[in-house]
Amino acid sequence: MRKLFITLGCLMLLLTACGKDEDNKTQNKTDNAQIENVQKVSVKKAKLPADVSQKFFNKFESYTPAQRYYFCAAFAMGAMSVAKPVTASAMVNYFMGLGVAKYNEGINENTYKAFNAGKNTFRNEHLVNTILKRKICENIMNEAADFARERNYHVADLDKRGKKEVEKVVRYIKMNKK
């Protein structure tokens, strides 16, 4: 499983490196076209980020505590994978095991939906910035880490619990791609 995450991390690194040799003229044309499109946005459409955020908060409030945790676990892993892919790979099992330890609920259909939503949050920059600014996931993840510390959970134990949950996530991802 560890090799899988290392391979995925390397693949992400390669994918982000692709296209770096593009001609500056092409990039400038693309940038100019994007700027023109942004300038053409109407006032009504300018409210879209707030609408997206409100829709997110309405959905997030309906989540169970375990669903919120798994949403934030995926969000945290996504944020780390952008900044430090190696750290993200190392933390996957820990985060998943911590969820099982704190909430006595692993990955199932309900928690996977929240996990998947957290993973897909990075498609909306405004939403990501809102979550970061309000420290929504930071607070949930810190609370879970405090729980583990107070109960004297060892990282190795949480990693072991998390491996089973990661396998479940991989199965759900494979099922959803079919």
Image: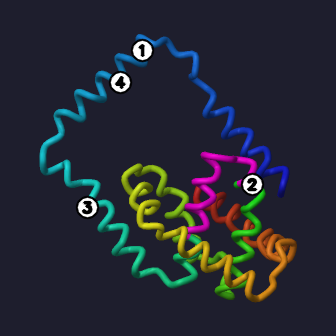
Residue furthest left in the image = 43
10 magenta-colored: no
The answer to which image quadrant residue 17 occupies is top right
The correct choice, above or below, for 38 with respect to 78 in the image is above
What's the amino acid at mark 1? Thr
Crowd tier of the residue under label 2, counting other residues whose Cα lies within 10 Å: few below 14, some 14–19, many 20 or above = many
Residue at 73 percent across and 82 percent down: it is 148
Crowd tier of the residue under label 1, counting other residues whose Cα lies within 10 Å: few below 14, some 14–19, many 20 or above = few
Residue at 70 percent across and 47 percent down: it is 85
Colour mode? rainbow
Location of mark 4 (residue): 31
What's the amino acid at mark 2? Ser
What's the amino acid at mark 4? Asp
Location of mark 2 (residue): 89
Q: Nearer the viewer, residue 177 or 113?
A: 113
Location of mark 1 (residue): 26
Q: Which residues are magenta?
A: 71-87
**In whole angstroms, how far apart are the C-alphas of marks 4 and 1?**
9 Å
Q: Which mark is residue 51?
A: 3
x and y percentages locating residue 83 in the rendered image: 62, 46
Q: Earlier in the sequence, mark 1 or mark 2?
A: 1
What's the amino acid at mark 3? Asp
Instruction: Tell me if label 3 and label 4 are in contact, CB under 8 Å.
Output: no
Crowd tier of the residue under label 4, counting other residues whose Cα lies within 10 Å: few below 14, some 14–19, many 20 or above = few
Classify mark 3: helix, strand or loop: helix
**In whole angstroms, how far apart are the C-alphas of marks 1 and 2?**
34 Å
